[in-house]
Structure formats: C-alpha cells, structure tokens
Image: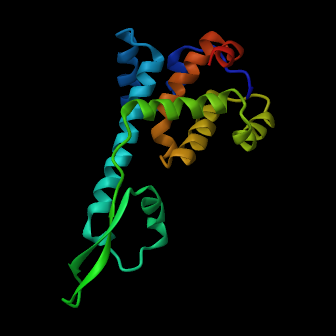
Amino acid sequence: MICKIPNLPIEKWLAPLKETKRNIILKKFERNLKPKTIALKMVRIEFEKKFQKKKVAAAKPKFVRRHIASFQSKIISEATLIEFEKLPTPTGVEKKLPVVIPPSLPSQTSYSRRFMVEFNKFVCGHDSYKDYHDELKKHKNITTTYLVAIISSALGAKFGLAASLLSPPIAILLFSVGQIGLNAYCKNG
C-alpha cells in the first residue's frame, strides 16, 4: 500500500485543477455518473489524441528520412510496417526512402484497461513503482495535490503522456479509492 488516501469531497481532490476543467468534472458528478466512468472516459480521450497525433506525424513527409533519427525509434518500434517508396529528395533525385506506417489505434477498452492496471499497481504498492512509493513514505503529511502529482508523473512516464493530462482522472480515481478505503480497493481491485 502506498499511503493513507483520505476520504475527502471531490471538490478537495479537484482543487489544484484549472477552474474550467474542475467545473466540467463537477457537472458530470451532478449527473450522477460513476467516478470511474468519468475518469476512464477522460483517459480514453487523451490516449486517442496521443495516438492520432502519432499517426498523423508519422505520415508527414518531414518524418521520412534516409536515416531515421533516434527520437523516431519509438514510432518505428510501434509501427506495424516500414515500407520503402520512391520519393523526391531536396536535390530532385528520386530515391527509395523509408516510410513509417503507424500501428492501428488500440480499442477504447484497451486504453482503459491498461490505465487501470497501472493505476491499481501504483495504488496497491506494486514493486514496479517502488521508487515512487519510497518517495511517498518519506513524507508524513501528504497533500492531495502532491499525491495526484506523483501518480500522474509516474503513469504519464509509463504512457508517454504529460502528467497534467492525467491529473484529472487520477484525482477522480483517488476520490473513489478514498471513499471505499485503500485496503478494500486493493482486495477487490
């Protein structure tokens, strides 16, 4: 287990967020949507944006290079196919250059499932997040903002998303965990 997650009202968990984002989430709570449903929908939207950008970026001509740069190695490792096409070069001579074909987008349920698996691992104390857990154990009074930031940065690094994009769904899920208690959550997780 990471640390005690307090049972606080949702407004306290969402306090660090920008007012517009906070108001959108609170309206969803007013419609009696389940916290997990709200959080996972937000996660799916962020994952779809990320994969759509990757798909578009890989199709752009500026990503077509004779020697693929190191920052593109991740795209290649996730690509389903690398084709060679004759494309004009800056000198006007046509040469065969690699074109990265990005993978198809995973289904929406796989986004949610992957995110929830990693969130559960973090919250329930899995060894893969030991460094983060050790950091949390150093502090006696952990604020909700700090807890959300630590988990967001850990999962953001795992999925290649900015921590700020994952903060709202993580705050909502921590609110939910706080309501039922960490031990009960991890047992039924």
- The answer to which image quadrant residue 25 occupies is top left
- The answer to which image quadrant residue 147 occupies is top right
Q: Is residue 134 above or below residue 40?
A: below
What residue sits 42% from the left and 74% below the top? 68
Q: Position of residue 141 (x, y in %)?
A: 75, 28
Disc tally is: 0
Q: Left or right: 118 with respect to 169?
A: right
Q: Position of residue 180 (x, y in %)?
A: 62, 10
Q: Which of the two residues, 96 or 74, is positioned nearer the viewer here? A: 96
Tell me the quarter of the image containing the C terminus: top right
Q: Position of residue 50 (x, y in %)?
A: 38, 47
Tell me the quarter of the image containing the N terminus: top right
- The answer to which image quadrant residue 29 occupies is top left
Q: Left or right: 123 with respect to 172?
A: right
What residue sits 44% from the left and 55% below the top? 78
Q: Is residue 16 visible?
A: no
Structure colour scheme: rainbow
Q: Position of residue 35 (x, y in %)?
A: 47, 17
Q: Is residue 126 above or below residue 92?
A: above
What residue sits 48% from the left and 41% below the top? 164
Q: Is residue 95 visible?
A: yes
